[in-house]
Image (cartoon, grey):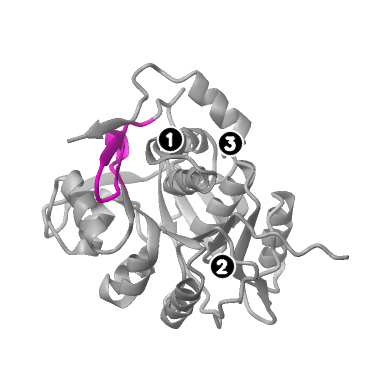
Amino acid sequence: MEEEPKALDFVAVGDIVTDSFIDLKDVRIDKEKDEGDHGYDEICFRFGDKIPYEDVEVVPAVGNSPNAAVSASRLGLNTGLITNVGDDIYGKQDLEQLRSESIDLSNVEVHEGERSNLHYVLQFGAERTILVNHQQYNYKFPELDPAPKYLYLSSLAENSLPYHEEIADYLEKHSETKLAFQPGTFQMKLGYEKLKRLYELSELFFCNKQEAQRILETKEDDIKELAKIMHEHGPNIAVITDGVNGAYAFDGNEMWHMPMYPDPKPPIDRTGAGDSFSSTFTAAMATGKSIPEALEWGPVNSMAVVQDIGAQAGLLSREKLLEHLENRPEDYQPSKLE
């Protein structure tokens, strides 16, 4: 007698890309301010000139959701990915890489005659600027049976609004599946109202401080207030990161703060730090951990991933992550805020 398929613990949904990391050499960083007086950096080089670079490295099968899937799989969760690729060499390399990470690919759609996503990452020190181009696939959400414990939703292309509605329909029919939502650029551009159903269906929600201000269309600068406002907009647990100031989580009753896990040496590449934090927090919750425990897990993987090029090379196994926690500094503890 055939056994019924086991429900996946973690299924990531979102676009997959190949990143070409170009290590720049002869550029200038200028400090600027936007209309809201928020500071930002501009990367500048001579237009029309030949710009030397140090090195280039091609990394397949990345993107917010594939990064999250690899993170969850290495942490021991039974993991799948819902995504789309073309039938070109980049799509084939993406699938080969994901198979090596033991990720279920039964819901990956290969589009005949179409290209896969290819991005260029302009690297300068530990910071990067990414040139992006998402192929506009004909998205269709599969009927997942059995339903997974967690659906992790992140970056999709600009033609994907109807697809988001399909995802919301699925979640409303399958209350046993919890949604973790880490919006990408286009999802934030859509605004809250167009994705209101997904915000309200979210068990977990992740973004950084600046993204929260953008989504909520507010100049509120107190991150604790931002977490409370985000919670009021639907998510059961709102998690907001603030760079070197750590991460905050609010569940409607309690507010928690977690500092960064200290870097053993200066970061090499910050690509994927947010993905590793969010996915590791979600993986911890999927295995029955509390909010403070999940907050302890997340920054450890962020610390590890910035020590390597790309968003996946540094991701830890569960054993290694727990080893870092055992050897944590004394002040690496979650604190409950008033």
Of marks 1 and 3, the one in the foreground: 1
Question: Callout 3: few (<14), some (14-19), or many (20+) C-alpha neighbours within 10 Å?
Answer: many
Q: CA distance from mark 1 to mark 3?
A: 17 Å
Q: Pick whichever of labels 1 and 3 is earlier in the sequence.
A: 1
- Residue that numbered label 3 is attached to: 316
Quarter occupied by residue 193: bottom left
Q: Amino acid at mark 3?
A: Leu
- Residue that numbered label 1 is attached to: 293
Q: Pick whichever of labels 1 and 2 is earlier in the sequence.
A: 2
Can residue 64 be seen in the rendering of this structure? Answer: yes
Q: CA distance from mark 1 to mark 2?
A: 35 Å
Q: Amino acid at mark 2?
A: Asn
- Residue that numbered label 2 is attached to: 117
Quarter occupied by residue 144: bottom right
- Residue 8 belongs to the span the image colors magenta: no
Which residue corresponds to the image point at 74% horizontal and 63% vertical from the top-left?
Answer: 5
| Figure quadrant of the N terminus | bottom right
Residue at the far front in the pictured view: 1
Judge from the rendering whether residue 190 lies leftward or rightward of residue 213; answer left or right: right
In the image shown, does 309 or 238 lie closer to the viewer?
Answer: 238
